[in-house]
Image: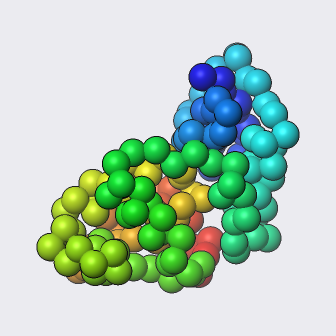
């Protein structure tokens, strides 16, 4: 596994990749061993445009390798159907994949989203209107939601 690190306005973005990018995450500190590629540059470029409010839709899904169970992949892919600037709930995501009783399992799968920002898990909130948790902190989730509003 190789890694590439990029500075962004919300922190260090880490790419883990082999043949394709396998995860995108947010860190406080970068490792010295950054091996950037044209693929990581392209994906970061789109994330950077998004964070600047210049991009509303990603077009780099072919550079990402989504791993996990079939259920996890189905849930993560469903996140792409939540439009920019809109929110959904864990319950609505479960209903959209025809798993009405799997709200908790959907929430767990979303919590394991390997592609921070690109698959917009930050757009999913609780049914009671609370914004819920976020792997990189509620402040980052609030920032992303505000960016899209």
Q: Place residue 7 in its image quadrant.
A: top right
Q: Place residue 3 in its image quadrant.
A: top right
Q: Which residue is drawn at 48% across and 64% down?
A: 77
Residue extending furthest toward the left: 101
Q: Is 40 situated above or below 87?
A: above
Residue 49 pos. (x, y %): 78, 61
Residue 119 pos. (x, y %): 54, 61
Q: Is 81 situated above or below 77?
A: below
> How many labels, in total?
0
Q: Nearer the viewer, residue 57 or 86?
A: 57
Kindly tell me whether residue 39 is visible in this rendering: yes
Q: Which residue is drawn at 46% across and 44% down?
A: 67
Residue 135 pos. (x, y %): 40, 48
Residue extending furthest toward the front: 70
Q: Which colour scheme is used?
A: rainbow
Q: Residue at x 44, y 51 (%)?
A: 113
Quadrant where the C terminus sits is bottom right
Q: Nearer the viewer, residue 75 or 24?
A: 75
Kindly tell me whether residue 12 is visible in this rendering: no
Quadrant where the N terminus sits is top right
Q: Which residue is drawn at 76% across and 58% down?
A: 46
Q: In this view, does 119 lie to the left or right of 90?
A: right
Residue extending furthest toward the right: 38
Q: Is 31 situated above or below 99?
A: above
Q: Nearer the viewer, residue 149 or 13?
A: 13
Q: Nearer the viewer, residue 44 or 38?
A: 38
């Amino acid at each position: 596994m190789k890694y590439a690190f990029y500075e962004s306005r919300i922190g260090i973005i880490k790419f883990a990749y082999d043949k394709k990018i396998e995860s995108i995450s947010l860190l406080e500190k970068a490792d010295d061993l950054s091996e950037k590629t044209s693929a990581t540059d392209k994906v970061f470029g789109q994330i950077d445009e998004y964070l600047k409010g210049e991009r509303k839709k990603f077009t780099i899904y072919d550079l990402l390798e989504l791993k996990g169970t079939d259920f996890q992949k189905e849930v993560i892919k469903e996140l792409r159907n939540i439009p920019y600037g809109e929110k959904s709930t864990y319950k609505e995501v479960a209903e959209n994949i025809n798993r009405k009783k799997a709200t908790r399992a959907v929430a767990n799968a979303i919590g394991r989203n390997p592609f921070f920002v690109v698959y917009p898990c930050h757009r999913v909130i609780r049914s009671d209107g609370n914004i819920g948790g976020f792997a990189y902190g509620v402040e980052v989730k609030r920032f992303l939601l505000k960016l899209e509003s």
